Amino acid sequence: MKQKPTTIYYHLKENKGILILSKVDASLQKPEMETELQGSFIELRKALFRLNVKDASLLSTAQALLRWHDAHRFCSRSGQPTKKNVAGSKRVCPSSKTIYYPQMAPVVITLVSDGTRCLLARQSSFPKGMYSALAGFCDIGETVEEAVQREVAEEVGLEVDRLQYSASQHWPFPNSSLMIACHAIVKPGQTEIQVNLRELEAAAWFSHDEVVAALKRDRPYTQQQDGTFPFWLPPKLAIAHQLIKEWVEKPTCPSLPA
C-alpha cells in the first residue's frame, strides 16, 4: 500500500517584534487551518511581495532553509541519515563525519541597454503581461562577467560590450539562489534581437517612456477590454525592479569594460 506524502505546514507569526516560524498540525483541513490561524493561505511568491523588506528576507531565508533540510536528510557518501544542529545552520553525518552547509546557486540577472532603450523579456511561466531582465545560472568555472556575456548571447543573440555590477539578492525560488544584478551595454549598431524560444517566450526593446509608464501601473494583473494584459514589471521587492528603476533614473550611466 502506497503511503500518502506527508504535508508539513508552518505558521509565521510575530511576537514582540520577532517573527517566529512554527509547525502546525497537518491533520487539519485547509478551512480549519485558516480558522485556527485566523488567516488565509497565499502563494509564497505573492506573500513575499506583500511584506516589508525585513520580514520578506526572513521568510525567504526560512523557506530556503526548510527546503534545504528536507533535501539533505541523507549523506551522499554513506547513505546514512544526517542530523541537523540546534541552530539549523548545518547537517552532520554521524557515520562519515561529513558536514553539510546550506548552499546557494549563483544567478546573473542582467538589464541590457543600447543607451536609449532597455531590453526586457518574459518566460511562459511569468504572469500575463510581465516582462523582466534576463537571468541565468552561472556555470562551473565561469566568472560573473563570462556568465552575463554567455546568457545575453544565448537568450537574445546580442554581444555585451560593457557591464557594471549593481547589487545582489537572495531568492528562494525554485531553490536558494544568489541573484547577482548587473547592467550591460550592447555593442553599438548590433541591437537586432534573436529570441531563443527554448528559453524565452518573447523579448523586446522598450523606450524610457514605456518603462516609466509601466513602473506607475498599480494593478498590473487587470485584463484590458480587448483581452490583452498591459505591459508591467516585477514588484518593488524583486531585484529586477531595482535594476529597471536604476536605468530609468540614469539610462546612460557610465559602465565598466566587460
Image (cartoon, grey):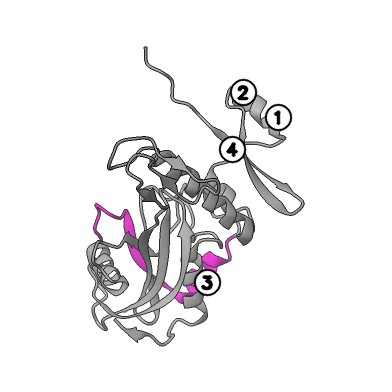
* Residues rendered magenta in the picture: 193-217
Q: Which residue, given by chain and number where applicable, does mark 3 sit on?
A: 212
Q: Which residue, given by chain and number where applicable, does mark 1 sit on?
A: 36
Q: Is residue 43 above or below residue 117?
A: above
Q: Residues within 10 Å of mark 1 (few under 14, many from 20)?
A: few
Residue closest to the eye, 236 or 124: 236
Q: Foreground mark, 1 or 3?
A: 1
Cα–Cα span, label 1 and label 4:
13 Å
Amino acid type, mark 3: Val
Q: Position of residue 188 (x, y in %)?
A: 27, 84
Mark 4 and 3 residues: CB-CB less than 8 Å, in contact?
no
Cα–Cα span, label 2 and label 1:
9 Å
Q: Which mark is residue 10?
A: 4
Q: Foreground mark, 4 or 3?
A: 4
Quadrant hosting residue 2: top left
Q: Position of residue 29 (x, y in %)?
A: 60, 23
Q: Secondary structure at mark 1?
A: helix
Q: Which residue, given by chain and number where applicable, does mark 2 sit on?
A: 28
Amino acid type, mark 2: Leu
Q: Secondary structure at mark 2?
A: loop
Quadrant hosting residue 163: bottom left
Give whichever of discs 2 and 1 has the lower sequence position.
2
Cα–Cα span, label 2 and label 3:
46 Å
Give whichever of discs 2 and 3 has the lower sequence position.
2
Cα–Cα span, label 4 and label 3:
39 Å
